[in-house]
Image (cartoon, grey):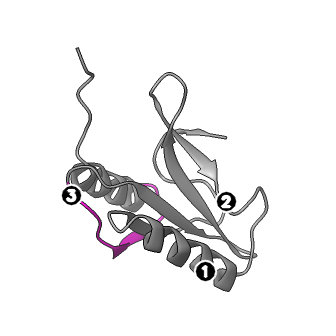
C-alpha cells in the first residue's frame, strides 16, 4: 500500500507558520501545484543566499539538498537557479525565509 503524503499546499502553510514561530518570517514567492508540487526554499542569510531543493531519498523520505552549494552565494545566482528550475518544472512552489543561520524553520534531513 502506498504511503499517504501531505499535499504541497498544506505543507507550505505549515512551513510558513513554523517560520513565524521560529523568528524566520517567510513568504510564498511562487505558488505551485497545491496537491503535488515540489518545493524550493530560498534562505536569506547574513552574507548571501542559498536554495534548498526538496527530494525523496532512497527510502522515499523527504530530504533537502543545498542546491546552490554548501556556501552562500549572491542573490542573483539563487534567482537564476530558481528561474531555471521553474522553467523545467512549472508546478514548483518557491518559498523565501529570512534565516541568518541558513537553516530552514522546519525539520528535515539536509544533504
The disc, 1 or 3, on the residue closer to the chain's N-terminal end is 3
Which of pointers 1 and 2 lies earlier in the amino acid sequence? 1
Q: Main secondary structure of the magenta part?
A: loop
Task: Write down the residue under mark 3.
Answer: 34
Query: Is residue 27 covered in magenta?
Result: yes
Measured in 3D between alpha carbons, the distance from the residue under mark 1 to the one under mark 3, in whole angstroms, is 24 Å
Q: Which residues are magenta?
A: 22-34
Q: Tell me if 43 is positioned left or right of 74 in this view.
A: left
* Mark found first going from the N terminus, 2 or 3: 3
**Residue with the mark numbered 2:** 101
Residue identified by numbered label 1: 80
Which quadrant holds residue 57?
A: top right
Q: Position of residue 36 (x, y in %)?
A: 27, 49
The correct choice, above or below, for 27 with respect to 104 in the image is below
Q: Is residue 78 left or right of residue 53?
A: right
Q: Quadrant of residue 73?
A: bottom right
Q: Is residue 44 above or below residue 15?
A: below
Amino acid at each position: 500500500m502506498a504511503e499517504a503524503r501531505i499535499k504541497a499546499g498544506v505543507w507550505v502553510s505549515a512551513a510558513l507558520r513554523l517560520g513565524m514561530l521560529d523568528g524566520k518570517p517567510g513568504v510564498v514567492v511562487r505558488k505551485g501545484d497545491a496537491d503535488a508540487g515540489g518545493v524550493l526554499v530560498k534562505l536569506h542569510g547574513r552574507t548571501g543566499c542559498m536554495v534548498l531543493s526538496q527530494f525523496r531519498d532512497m527510502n522515499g523520505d523527504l530530504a533537502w539538498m543545498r542546491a546552490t552549494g554548501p556556501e552562500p552565494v549572491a542573490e542573483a545566482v539563487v534567482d537564476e537557479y530558481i528561474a531555471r528550475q521553474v522553467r523545467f518544472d512549472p508546478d514548483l512552489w518557491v518559498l523565501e525565509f529570512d534565516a541568518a543561520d541558513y537553516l530552514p524553520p522546519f525539520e528535515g534531513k539536509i544533504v
